[in-house]
Image: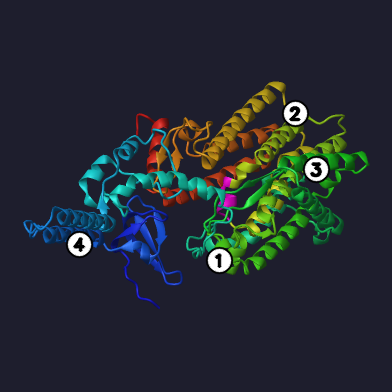
C-alpha cells in the first residue's frame, strides 16, 4: 500500500476539480480504498482530491524562484562579451545577430511556459464578489469558480490569491476556450462518463440502523391504525388502540390481484411512445439519464379506463368496503419490490449506488435504498413509482370515496365538503403531472436511493393516508357553509400560487440560470461555480415551496370540520415531514455551498427582519 504524502490537519494547495486553479485547503481525512483525500476549503466546502491534485504550500514559491533564477542566469550568459562581434563581414554579423535573436526568443518562450504566474482576481470578478446581488454569468462547470471572499480578505493575505498554471499569454485565450467548453460537453454528456466510487455513508438518518429497523414496522402500523380509527363511528384518537379485526380478514387474493393489475397498467402507459424525452441532471459519474415525460397522458388514459369500467357496471365503492385489504395488499407489494431492489443493488456498479444508502448495513441500506436509479433497460423504477401508481391511485381512491358517500348517505350528489377535498387534491395531482419534468431536480431523484422507504411512501403512504379526509367524510359528514367554503378556496389558492411559483423558479434556475423567467433575479455566487437565488420567492423565505405545501394541506383538512383531529393528521404529518426535510436540505446545502449558504440565510433573514440583521 503506498504511503501517504499528506497528513490530516495539514495545510496544502489543492486543485479545484476540472480547472487549473489551486486554493489553500486543509486535509481532513484519507480513504485508503479509493486513495482520495477529503479536503476542506476556506469557505467550508468539502471535496475529495487525488494526491496528484495536491501540492505542498511552498511548491509554487519554489517553482517561481527557480524560474526567475534560470531566467537571470540566461541573461547573464548572453551579455558576458558584448564587444566580440566579428568585423570580417557585415553579412556574417547579420546572420549571427538573427541567430541569437531566434535563440533568445526561444528561451523566453520556454521561460513563459515554465513560469507559474501568481495573479490576483480580475477586477470584474472582485466587483461581482463585492456586489453578490448583481446577476452575473455563472458556469456550472468548475472552470469558472468564484471564491466567496471580501476585498479586504483578498488584499490582506498572500494565500487568498489564485494560483494559475497557464502562461500569461494564454490567459485571454483560455477564457474564450472555457466559455465555449460547456456547450461542447452538453452535446455528448449522455455518453461522457468516468469512473466514480460512491464513498461509504457515515452520516445516517432516521435514527441510524436502529431507527431504520423500527421504521420498517412503524410505518405499516401507522397506516393501519389511521384507517381503523377513521373507519369507526367515533373517529377519536382517544380510542387508541382500535379494535383489531381478524387477521384473515386483512388479506384478499382478489384485492391483491387488482393492486398488481393497477401497477402493470400504469407501467404499460409509461412505456408508450407518447410524450417528450428529456435529460436528467448530470450524475456524479458523468452520466445523464433520459426520462419520458408522459405523466399527464397517463392520468388522462387512466380516467378513460376508470370511466369505461364504471360504465360497464363496476362499483368503485368496492374500494371503500375493502380499504384495509387494499392497504395491506399495497404494503405486501411494496415489501416485495423493496426486497427486489436491494437484491439487484448488490450487483450494481459502484458508481450507481446512492450516496445516502451505502452504509454497509443490510437493514439501513434496504430501508433507505442502496441503488440510486435502478432501471430495467430504459424503465426507471424510482421515477415511475414517484408519480404514477400511487399519485394517480390517490385520485381514484378519492373518486371511490365520493361515490361511497353518495351511496351510504343516500345523496343525489356529493356534499360540498367532499367536492372541496376532491377538487383541491385533484388540482394538486394534475399540477404534479403537468409539471412532471420538475421532479428531475428534486432530492428524491438526484440524491435518495430507491429502497423500501420510497417504495412504501409512493405505493402505500401517499394513496392511503393522503386520501384520509375523503375516507373520513364517508362516515362522518360535515356541513360546510358557502362563506366558509369561499375562505377555504381562497386559502388553497394562496398556497397553490406560492407552491407553484416557488417550484417553477427553482426548476427553471437549476436547468438554465439564463432563462428569461429567472434572468432578472439576484443571486449569490458559490465556490461550486453555481449560484443561489436570493430574490423572488426564494428571497422571501428559505423554502417557499414547503410553505405553500403546508398552506394547501391545511385547506384540505378544513372541510372535515373540527369534531376530530384525525382529518388533520395530514397537515400535522406534512409539517413535521417538511421540517425534517428542511433540516436535511440545510445540512446538504451548508456542506455543499459553505459560507455562501450562510450569506444566503443572512440575506433572507434581513428581508424578513430588516431592523435586526
Query: Counting residues from the N terminus, which is met first, the one under dot 3 or under dot 2?
Result: 3
Residue 491 in view of the camera: yes
Residue drawn at point x = 25 percent, y = 44 percent = 153
Marks 3 and 1, how far apart in space? 38 Å
Camera-side residue of 88 and 65: 88
- Quadrant of the rendered image containing residue 413: top right
- Label 3: which residue? 302
Query: Counting residues from the N terminus, which is met first, the one under dot 2 or under dot 4?
Result: 4
- Label 1: which residue? 350
Residue 479 is marked as 2
Residue neighbourhood size for the residue with mark 4, other residues' Cα within 10 Å, grouped as few (<14), some (14–19), many (≥20): some
Q: For the magenta stretch, what is the residue range? A: 441-448
Callout 4 secondary element: helix
Query: Counting residues from the N terminus, which is met first, the one under dot 1 or under dot 4?
Result: 4
- Quadrant of the rendered image containing residue 66: bottom left
Query: Counting residues from the N terminus, which is met first, the one under dot 4 or under dot 3?
Result: 4
Look at discs 3 and 1 and give the one toward the viewer.
1
Residue 140 in view of the camera: no
Residue drawn at point x = 54 percent, y = 42 percent = 511
Callout 1 secondary element: helix
Residue drawn at point x = 72 percent, y = 47 percent = 388
Marks 1 and 2, how far apart in space? 57 Å
Residue 69 lies, with reference to residue 168, above or below; the image says below
Look at discs 1 and 2 and give the one toward the viewer.
1
- Label 4: which residue? 66
Camera-side residue of 139 and 4: 139
Locate residue 427, reporting x and y percent: 70, 34
Q: Main secondary structure of the magenta part?
A: helix
Residue neighbourhood size for the residue with mark 1, other residues' Cα within 10 Å, grouped as few (<14), some (14–19), many (≥20): some
Marks 1 and 4, how far apart in space? 43 Å
Residues at circles 1 and 2 in contact by the CB criterion of under 8 Å: no
Query: Counting residues from the N terminus, which is met first, the one under dot 1 or under dot 2?
Result: 1
Amino acid at each position: 500500500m503506498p504511503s501517504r504524502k499528506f497528513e490530516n490537519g495539514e495545510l496544502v494547495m489543492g486543485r479545484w476539480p476540472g480547472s487549473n486553479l489551486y486554493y489553500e485547503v486543509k486535509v481532513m481525512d484519507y480513504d485508503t480504498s479509493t486513495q482520495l483525500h477529503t479536503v476542506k476549503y476556506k469557505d467550508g466546502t468539502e471535496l475529495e482530491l487525488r494526491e496528484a491534485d495536491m501540492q505542498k504550500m511552498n511548491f509554487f514559491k519554489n517553482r517561481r524562484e527557480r524560474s526567475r533564477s534560470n531566467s537571470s542566469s540566461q541573461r547573464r550568459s548572453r551579455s558576458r562579451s558584448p564587444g566580440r562581434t566579428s568585423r570580417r563581414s557585415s553579412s556574417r554579423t547579420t546572420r549571427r545577430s538573427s541567430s541569437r535573436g531566434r535563440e533568445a526568443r526561444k528561451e523566453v518562450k520556454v521561460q513563459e511556459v515554465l513560469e507559474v504566474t501568481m495573479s490576483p482576481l480580475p477586477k470584474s470578478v472582485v466587483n461581482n464578489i463585492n456586489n453578490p446581488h448583481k446577476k452575473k454569468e455563472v458556469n456550472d462547470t468548475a472552470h469558472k469558480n468564484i471564491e466567496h471572499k471580501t476585498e479586504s480578505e483578498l488584499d490582506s493575505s498572500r494565500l487568498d490569491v489564485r494560483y494559475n498554471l497557464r502562461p500569461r499569454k494564454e490567459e485571454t485565450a483560455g477564457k474564450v476556450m472555457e466559455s465555449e467548453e460547456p456547450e461542447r460537453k452538453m452535446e455528448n454528456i449522455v455518453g461522457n462518463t468516468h469512473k466514480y466510487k460512491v464513498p461509504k455513508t457515515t452520516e445516517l438518518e432516521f435514527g441510524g440502523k436502529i431507527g431504520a429497523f423500527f421504521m420498517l414496522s412503524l410505518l405499516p402500523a401507522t397506516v393501519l391504525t389511521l384507517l381503523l380509527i377513521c373507519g369507526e363511528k367515533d373517529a377519536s384518537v382517544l380510542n387508541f388502540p382500535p379494535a383489531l379485526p381478524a387477521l384473515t380478514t386483512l388479506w384478499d387474493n382478489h384485492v391483491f390481484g387488482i393492486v398488481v393489475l393497477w401497477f402493470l397498467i400504469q407501467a404499460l402507459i409509461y412505456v408508450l411512445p407518447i410524450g417528450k424525452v428529456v435529460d436528467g441532471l448530470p450524475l456524479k459519474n458523468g452520466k445523464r439519464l433520459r426520462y419520458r415525460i408522459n405523466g399527464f397522458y397517463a392520468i388522462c388514459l387512466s380516467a378513460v379506463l376508470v370511466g369505461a369500467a364504471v360504465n360497464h357496471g363496476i362499483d368503485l365503492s368496492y374500494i371503500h368496503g375493502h380499504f384495509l385489504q387494499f392497504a395491506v395488499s399495497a404494503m405486501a407489494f411494496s415489501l416485495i419490490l423493496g426486497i427486489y431492489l436491494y437484491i439487484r443493488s448488490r450487483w450494481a456498479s459502484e458508481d450507481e449506488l446512492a450516496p445516502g444508502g451505502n452504509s454497509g448495513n443490510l437493514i439501513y441500506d434496504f430501508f433507505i435504498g442502496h441503488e440510486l436509479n435502478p432501471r430495467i433497460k430504459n424503465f426507471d423504477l424510482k421515477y415511475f413509482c414517484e408519480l404514477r401508481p400511487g399519485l394517480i391511485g390517490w385520485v381514484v381512491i378519492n373518486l371511490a370515496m365520493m361515490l361511497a358517500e353518495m351511496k351510504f348517505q343516500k345523496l343525489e350528489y356529493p356534499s360540498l365538503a367532499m367536492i372541496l377535498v376532491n377538487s383541491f387534491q385533484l388540482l394538486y395531482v394534475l399540477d404534479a403531472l403537468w409539471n412532471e419534468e420538475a421532479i428531475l431536480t428534486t432530492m428524491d431523484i438526484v440524491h435518495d436511493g430507491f429502497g423500501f422507504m420510497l417504495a412504501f411512501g409512493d405505493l402505500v403512504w401517499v394513496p392511503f393516508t393522503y386520501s384520509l379526509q375523503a375516507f373520513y367524510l364517508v362516515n362522518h359528514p360535515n356541513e360546510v357553509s358557502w362563506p366558509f367554503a369561499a375562505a377555504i378556496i381562497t386559502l388553497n389558492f394562496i398556497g397553490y400560487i406560492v407552491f407553484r411559483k416557488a417550484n417553477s423558479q427553482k426548476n427553471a434556475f437549476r436547468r438554465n440560470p439564463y432563462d428569461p423567467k429567472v434572468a432578472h433575479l439576484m443571486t449569490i455566487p458559490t465556490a461550486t461555480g453555481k449560484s443561489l437565488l436570493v430574490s423572488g420567492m426564494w428571497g422571501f423565505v428559505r423554502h417557499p415551496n414547503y410553505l405553500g405545501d403546508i398552506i394547501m394541506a391545511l385547506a384540505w383538512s378544513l372541510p372535515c370540520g373540527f369534531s376530530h383531529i384525525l382529518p388533520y393528521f395530514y397537515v400535522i404529518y406534512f409539517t413535521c415531514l417538511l421540517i425534517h426535510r428542511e433540516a436535511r436540505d440545510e445540512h446538504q446545502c451548508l456542506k455543499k455551498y459553505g459560507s455562501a449558504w450562510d450569506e444566503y440565510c443572512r440575506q433572507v433573514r434581513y428581508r424578513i427582519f430588516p431592523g435586526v440583521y
